[in-house]
Amino acid sequence: MDTLSLSTLGHHLQSLRRAQGWSLSRLAAAAGIAKSNLSRLEQGNGNPTLDTIWRLAVQLKVPFGTLVAPIAVPLGEDGVEVRLIDQGKDTPQVDAYWMRCAPFTTRVAEPHTPGARESLTLISGHLEAGPEGDTRRLAAGDTLTFPADRAHCYRTGDDWATLLVSVVYHGEAQR
């Protein structure tokens, strides 16, 4: 992530944390990251993983898209790129993402907030996806919907996979 995006993410994260009255120590402990790492992230330094950003969003009880909305660049690591396309303004909240996975990539995503459901439509390539232990093989044009409030994975074979992902937040997720 570029310097401007890191700084933007850090300031936004800090404002969300403070708006909820959370200390740096409390959020770091709840998200399972070192306080020093969270401090660096809020200062616009560091290189947060997608999992770290997801855990912070879950602990703050905001959709992932709310946390990354101010960032215009794709977020990525280990062969996976994710970009927020749009966020709905209604209830329940719906976030839409573009996602691309490199060949021979396995990404295990941590659970979203309670009650969240995820739908993905494969645009190109092949992909195995779904909750751990209950995945399904998809080809271009296939759509899969599953509970996203438990760990789930995306696994590619020997080609790139491009997909559209929507997450519908029910329950605790707030804007």
Image (cartoon, helix red, strand yellow):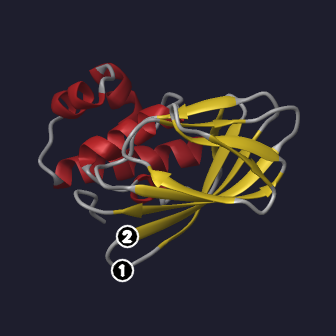
Q: Is residue 49 left or right of residue 173?
A: right
Identify the residue shown where x is 66% and y is 29%: 106
**Residue 2 is at least partly visible in this image:** no
Can you say which quadrant of the picture contains the C terminus?
bottom left
Q: Is residue 86 above or below residue 53?
A: below
Identify the residue shown where x is 43% and y is 39%: 53
Q: Nearer the viewer, residue 54 or 115?
A: 115
| Separation (CA) of disc 2 from disc 1 | 6 Å
**Residue 53 is at least partly visible in this image:** yes
Q: Secondary structure at mark 2?
A: strand
The residue to which callout 1 is attached is 90
Identify the residue shown where x is 53% and y is 38%: 134
Residue type (three-letter) at the residue carrying disc 1: Asp
Q: Position of residue 139 (x, y in %)?
A: 80, 52
Figure disc tally: 2
Disc 1 residue crowd, few under 14, some 14–19, many 20+, Cα 10 Å: few
Q: Is residue 151 left or right of residue 108?
A: left
Query: Decide: marks 2, 1 in contact (CB < 8 A)?
Result: yes
Can you say which quadrant of the picture contains the N terminus?
top right
Q: Secondary structure at mark 1?
A: loop
Disc 2 residue crowd, few under 14, some 14–19, many 20+, Cα 10 Å: some
Residue type (three-letter) at the residue carrying disc 2: Gln
Q: Nearer the viewer, residue 126 or 165?
A: 126
Q: Is residue 147 left or right of residue 14?
A: right
Name the quadrant containing residue 47: top right
Q: Position of residue 90 (x, y in %)?
A: 36, 80
Q: Position of residue 11 (x, y in %)?
A: 37, 49
Q: Position of residue 66 (x, y in %)?
A: 40, 59
- Residue reaching furthest left? 21
The residue to which callout 2 is attached is 93
Q: Is residue 48 above or below residue 82?
A: above
